[in-house]
Image (cartoon, grey):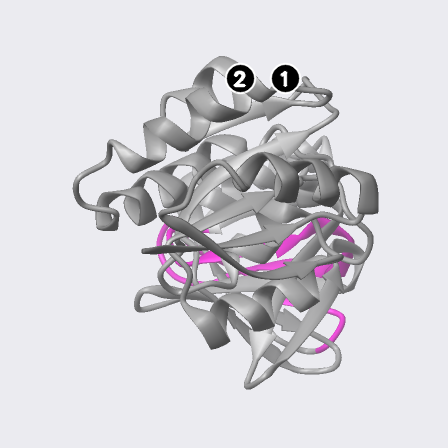
Amino acid sequence: MKRALIIDDEPLARMVVREYLLDFKDIELIQECNDGFEGLKAIQQHQPDLVFLDIQMPKITGFEMLELVEQPPAVIFATAFDQYAIKAFEAHAVDYLLKPFSKERFNKAVEKFLATAAPKPAAKQTEELLETAATQSPAQHERIVVKTGTKVKIIPVADVEYLQADDDYVSVITKEGSYLKNKTMSFFEQTLDPNHFVRVHRSYIVAIQQITRIDPYEKDAHLAILKSGAKIPVSKTGYVKLKQVLGI
């Protein structure tokens, strides 16, 4: 018996999925959630095999919620929006249902999931999907969602002073403190607005508005002095990028 969750803020959409699932006796619907926070808690509690997930929801998007899950389950996206590179998604997620979808289309998606012998690879596929989707979701450019203990914190990118590589994580530095995000520096370099954030070093990305001056340091190297007093190393390549953005 496979266990499934529905995460969607629209009651009618949840009802449709619930009714369509009745034909699949080997899938048990264990919970319905109406937002990403509730969905995250349910995934952590129940460890489902399959999630029917909307993308655009209040508070946090479906993508942001999945980023906070250490081992994402198999996912069938169900959304009314078609601007999220559907063809690319279908290559990684179990399936992508565009609302309103028919019973036949729904059955095809579920049968595709059931045909997967080992559900574990779906977790890796979901991770790849999230990386692919980063530049497609407007919310990714406006905020960073992190998990602190059992709580979820939404950080507006305007509050970010700089980012620093930290082993397999990235430290997001704000005036309030430092927060770990399980992403790569390359992910943020591709996602953040290049007019406002510059990768000045292989281990640092800096918010341009936070820089007060740039001082010479060692041969072909500089230091970016931030409003907070932080001193960020700037490599030769990073210095070239900074000059281009600053117009100097």
Q: Which residue is drawn at 59% across and 21% down?
A: 103
Mark 1 crowdedness (10 Å alpha carbons): few <14, some 14-19, many ≥20: few
Between 19 and 131, the one nearer to me in the picture: 19
* Location of residue 39 in the rendering, given as x and y in whole percent from the top left corner: 62, 62
Position of 171 relative to 123 (above/below): below
Say above or below: 105 vs 15.
Answer: above
Quarter occupied by residue 150: bottom right
115 within the magenta span: no
Point out the stretch of residues depicted in magenta. Answer: 201-228
Q: Mark 2 points at which residue?
A: 105
Q: Specify the amino acid type for callout 1.
A: Ser
- Residue 196 visible in the shown view: no
Q: Can residue 110 be seen in this view?
A: yes
Q: Residue 5, position in %: x, y?
A: 54, 55
Residue 212 as seen in the image, left or right of residue 72: right
- The residue indicated by pointer 1 is 102
Pinpoint residue 139: horizontal percent, then vertical percent: 73, 43
Which disc number belongs to residue 116? none
Choose top left, top right, bottom left or bottom right for residue 172: bottom right
Depicted 174 relative to depicted 234: above or below: below
Return the residue nearer the eye: 217 or 15. 15
Q: How far apart are marks 1 and 2 (CA)?
A: 5 Å
- Residue drawn at 17 percent across, 40 percent down: 117
Residue at left 68%, top 37%?
Answer: 193
SS type, badge 2: helix
Q: Does the magenta stretch include residue 216?
A: yes
Q: In which quarter of the image is the C terminus?
A: top right
